[in-house]
Image: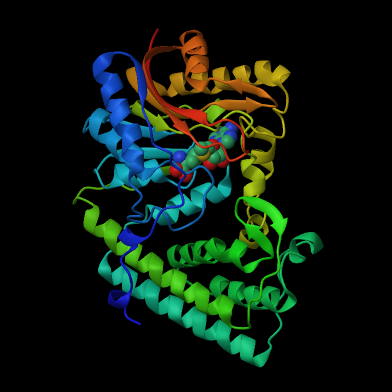
């Protein structure tokens, strides 16, 4: 099938929960209106560019990033996303020709962001596609010949796959590792990563529960090739959207609460979605993936902010407040004196205690070098079945 025969990605629906509804605003009116427009833009469900290529929990809605950048980024601003996850802000910065830096403590996040922000011209895409088909053909041949390959997994990890799927994936990985071009090889690993949960016995990315799946021999390889072709199409859309000057983002594996000092111009705009208090355990979301890719999740296990496993009780609010102060102070140290920070935050859930995230930032910001400027808030469904929570886009201005 040629890439032209397929549905354009724009028609697919993004898996982003959105409830819409009234947006409440406060603070500086002009800024608040722009924040409101950004939140409202999340009603748009098109899955464009490379955004929806790989599952990532609590991805920022691309339209929020887009509208916020259009309203607040100046041409010469260096944009920082200290919790960049799979790179939504970085993709949107790239298609606007903005310099950007993405930081995350999850090594997988950076690998996904690297692929999603990779600008490939037609020649590079064609070379990748040929390599993809070649890897697919070799993997198929392995399945037919029943060639043995060892999966780099613990017993517990291996038990998440039907034996024939595990064997096929192990062979596919060997073929990927044999690819000489590093850029292509790293992208192919992320193509495989995007399918691992689907091919495992895990029900979905958002649950650790197992379910029965019937996956016939050869299907893993077929899905891999299809997914790789999808990436080529998405890269084409990204390339078309990029202006002539469109710098690749810098990607940094670091703790946002302890950011390394940067050389040259410090950042003028922070646009980010920090973890929501007591809501996710990001490290566990990708449990199926680290070992296949040889990634070390331990720094994230130790340093993850807002982690549900640590904030289980209303009394943990002091810990959560201290974590928020730590990253605000860390951010303040690397930005320009007139910098603006736009933070998309959801209300925290510490056991039975709801924490209003916008109030928390407004209360803690000033001591950490950030004055509250404006905020816009909107209700979002709560996937734990509790009352809907509010999501806020908060603007802070650097002070001191
Ligand atoms: C809400 S998600 C960001 C999603 C991202 N905006 C996207 O669109 O994919 C929060 C991110 O914070 C990261 N994170 C958690 N603790 C961190 C820390 N101490 N330093 C840096 N990143 C951290 C998680 O790995 C996760 O990727």
Give me the residue at 79% from left, 60% from top: 156
Residue 76 higher or lower than 180, as above or below: above
Q: Quadrant of the rendered structure where residue 334 is?
A: top left
Q: How many marks?
A: 0
Examine the rendering and report whether any part of residue 149 can be seen: yes
**What is the quadrant of the C terminus in the image?**
top left
**What is the quadrant of the N terminus in the image?**
bottom left
Q: Residue furthest right?
A: 155
Front residue of 80 and 385: 385
Residue 303 relative to residue 224: left or right: right
Give me the residue at 63% from left, 86% from top: 143
Q: Quadrant of the rendered structure where residue 35 is?
A: top left
Q: Position of residue 272 (x, y in %)?
A: 43, 33
Q: Quadrant of the rendered structure where residue 124 is?
A: bottom left
Q: Position of residue 290 (x, y in %)?
A: 64, 55
Give me the residue at 53% from left, 20% from top: 356
Residue 297 relative to residue 47: left or right: right
Residue 380 higher or lower than 26, as above or below: below
Residue 257 relative to residue 236: left or right: right
Examine the rendering and report whether any part of residue 336 can be seen: no
Give me the residue at 38% from left, 75% from top: 129
Q: Position of residue 280 (x, y in %)?
A: 62, 38
């Amino acid at each position: 099938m040629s890439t032209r025969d397929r549905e354009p990605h724009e028609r697919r629906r993004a898996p982003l929960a959105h409830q819409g509804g009234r947006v409440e605003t406060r603070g500086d009116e002009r800024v608040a209106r722009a924040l409101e427009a950004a939140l409202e833009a999340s009603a748009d469900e098109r899955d464009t560019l490379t955004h929806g290529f790989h599952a990532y929990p609590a991805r920022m809605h691309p339209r929020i990033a887009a509208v916020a950048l259009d309203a607040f980024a100046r041409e010469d601003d260096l944009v920082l996303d200290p919790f960049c996850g799979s790179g939504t802000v970085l993709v949107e910065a790239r298609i606007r020709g903005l310099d950007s830096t993405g930081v995350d403590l999850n090594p997988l996040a950076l690998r996904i962001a690297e692929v999603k922000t990779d600008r490939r011209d037609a020649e590079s895409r064609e070379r990748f596609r040929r390599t993809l088909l070649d890897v697919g053909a070799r993997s198929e041949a392995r399945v037919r010949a029943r060639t043995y390959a060892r999966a780099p997994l613990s017993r517990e990890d291996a038990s998440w796959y039907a034996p024939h799927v595990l064997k096929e994936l192990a062979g596919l990985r060997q073929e990927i590792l044999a690819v000489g071009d590093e850029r292509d090889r790293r992208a192919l690993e992320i193509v495989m990563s995007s399918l691992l949960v689907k091919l495992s016995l895990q029900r979905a990315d958002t649950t650790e529960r197992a379910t029965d799946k019937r996956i016939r021999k050869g299907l893993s390889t077929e899905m891999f090739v299809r997914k790789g072709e999808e990436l080529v199409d998405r890269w084409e859309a990204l390339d078309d959207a990029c202006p002539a000057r469109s710098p690749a983002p810098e990607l940094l594996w670091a703790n946002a609460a302890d950011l390394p000092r940067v050389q040259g111009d410090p950042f003028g705009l922070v646009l980010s979605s920090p973890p929501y208090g007591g809501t996710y355990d990001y490290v566990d979301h990708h449990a199926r993936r680290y070992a296949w890719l040889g990634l070390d999740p331990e720094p994230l296990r130790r340093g993850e902010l807002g982690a549900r496993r640590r904030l289980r009780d209303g009394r943990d609010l002091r810990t959560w407040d201290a974590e928020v102060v730590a990253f605000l102070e860390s951010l303040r140290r690397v930005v320009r004196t007139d910098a603006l920070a736009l933070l998309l935050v959801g209300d925290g859930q510490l056991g039975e205690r709801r924490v209003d995230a916008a109030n928390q930032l407004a209360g803690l910001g000033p001591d950490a070098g950030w004055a509250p400027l404006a905020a816009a808030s909107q209700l979002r469904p709560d996937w734990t079945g509790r009352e809907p929570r509010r999501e806020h886009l908060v603007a802070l201005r650097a002070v001191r």
